[in-house]
Image (cartoon, rainbow, N blue to C red):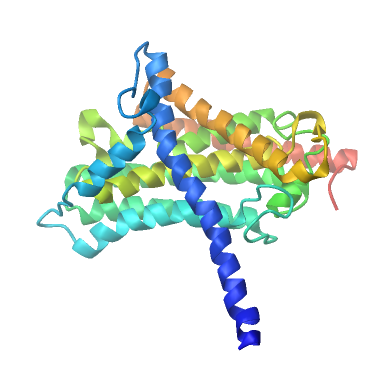
Amino acid sequence: MADFLQGYVLPTAITVGEILAIIVPLLLAVAYLTYAERKVLAWAQIRKGPNVVGPFGLLQPFADGLKLLLKETVIPTGANRVVFIAAPILTFSLSLIAWAVIPFDKGVVLADINVGILYLFAVSSLGVYGIVMAGWSSNSKYAFLGALRSAAQMVSYEVSMGFVIVSVLLCAGSLNLTAIVEAQRSVWYCLPLFPMFIVFFVSVLAETNRSPFDLPEGESELVAGFFVEYSAMAFALFYLGEYGNMILMSAMTVILFLGGWLAPFNIEPVGGGWAHLWAGFWFALKIGFVLFCFLWVRATVPRFRYDQLMRLGWKVFLPLSLFWLVLTAGVLVTMGWLPT
C-alpha cells in the first residue's frame, strides 16, 4: 500500500497540483485582461471604462462571467449540435494545454521537453480547427464565411511565423524553451533580430484574430463572424480562448525575443531565496508589456481590408522572413557563431 501511494498516488497528486498552479492564475489573468482592455481603451478614448461593480470596477469580470453563466445556451435549429458544442470547448482547451511547456524560470516548467517550441507551434496551429468547426456547424453563411476568413488568415501568417522561429532557433541552437531563454543572457534576441521581432509581433496579432486583423468577425459584413450564433457560456469559452491565446502568444514572444524570465542587464536579487519570485516578476512584467501593446494597437490602428491583410502576409512578411533566415544563417556560419 505504501509503495502504491508513493509510486502512483503521490506523483499524480503533485502533477495535478502543478497543473492547477498554472491554470487558476491563468484563468484569473484572462478575466482581468478583459478588464484591462476596457480600461486601456477607455483611457485612449478619454472615458471612464468599468467603474461601478466593485472598487474601481475590479469585480466587473466576475459580473460578466456570472451573467453569461446564467444565460440560456441557444443552439440554432439547423446546427450540428455535437460539433457546435465541441468547437468552443476545443478552442478554450487548446489555449490551456500549450502552457505545459512554458518555463517560468529555469527548472520551473510542467514538461521540460526538448522540442518545446515545436509543441507550442503545433498547438497554436490547431486553434484554427475550433473556429472552422464553429463556422461550419452553425449552418449560417455569415459564420461560415468568418471561419473561412480565419482559416486563410491563420495559415497565411503561420508560414512567416515559422521562418521567424527558425531564425531564433539558429541563434539559440536548441528547440528547448529553457535553453532559448538561457542563450539570451548576453543579449536579448529582440536587438539582433529586431525586424523579425516586429514581423513576429504583427503575425501574432493576425494569428489571434486581434485588431487590426480581426477580419473574421467584421461587424459591417459578417455581423460577428464565426461565433455569431453562439450565446451564454459557449460564447464565453470563445472569449476566454481568445484572451488565453493572447497571453500564450505574449509569453511566446517574451521567451523568443525578450529574454524570458531574465532581468535586464542580468540584475540578480539580494539573497538566493527570492530567485524564483524575481524571475516570475520579470516574466509577468514582460508579458504584461506585450499585452499592453496588443491593446494599444487595438485602440489606435484601423482595421485592414482583407486584400491588404493577405498581401502583407504573402508578399511582405514571407519574403522578408525568408531573406532574414538566410541572412542569419550566413552571418552565423561566416563568423563562426553557429551554436554546436
Q: What is the x, y in percent for residue 212?
A: 41, 27
Q: What is the x, y in percent for residue 144?
A: 24, 47
Q: Residue at x 59, y 43 (%)?
A: 252
Q: What is the quadrant of residue 272 in the picture?
A: top right
Q: Residue at x 40, y 51 (%)?
A: 128
Return the residue nearer the eye: 167 or 71.
Answer: 71
Q: Residue at x 65, y 47 (%)?
A: 104
Q: What is the quadrant of residue 251 in the picture?
A: top right
**Residue reaching furthest to the top:** 46
**Residue reaching furthest to the left:** 77
Q: Residue at x 29, y 37 (%)?
A: 63
**Residue reaching furthest to the bottom:** 1
The answer to whether residue 129 is above or below residue 305 is below
Please count the marks in the image.
0
Q: What is the x, y in percent for residue 207?
A: 46, 41
Q: What is the x, y in percent for residue 26?
A: 49, 46
Image quadrant holding the N terminus, namely bottom right
Q: Report if residue 304 is visible in the image.
A: no
Return the residue nearer the eye: 164 or 249.
Answer: 249
Q: With 238 as the anchor, is 116 left or right in this view?
A: right
Return the residue nearer the eye: 193 or 295.
Answer: 295
Q: With 315 as the anchor, is 320 left or right in this view?
A: right
The answer to whether residue 304 is above or below residue 139 is above
Q: With 188 as the anchor, is 76 left or right in this view?
A: left
Q: Report if residue 32 is visible in the image.
A: yes
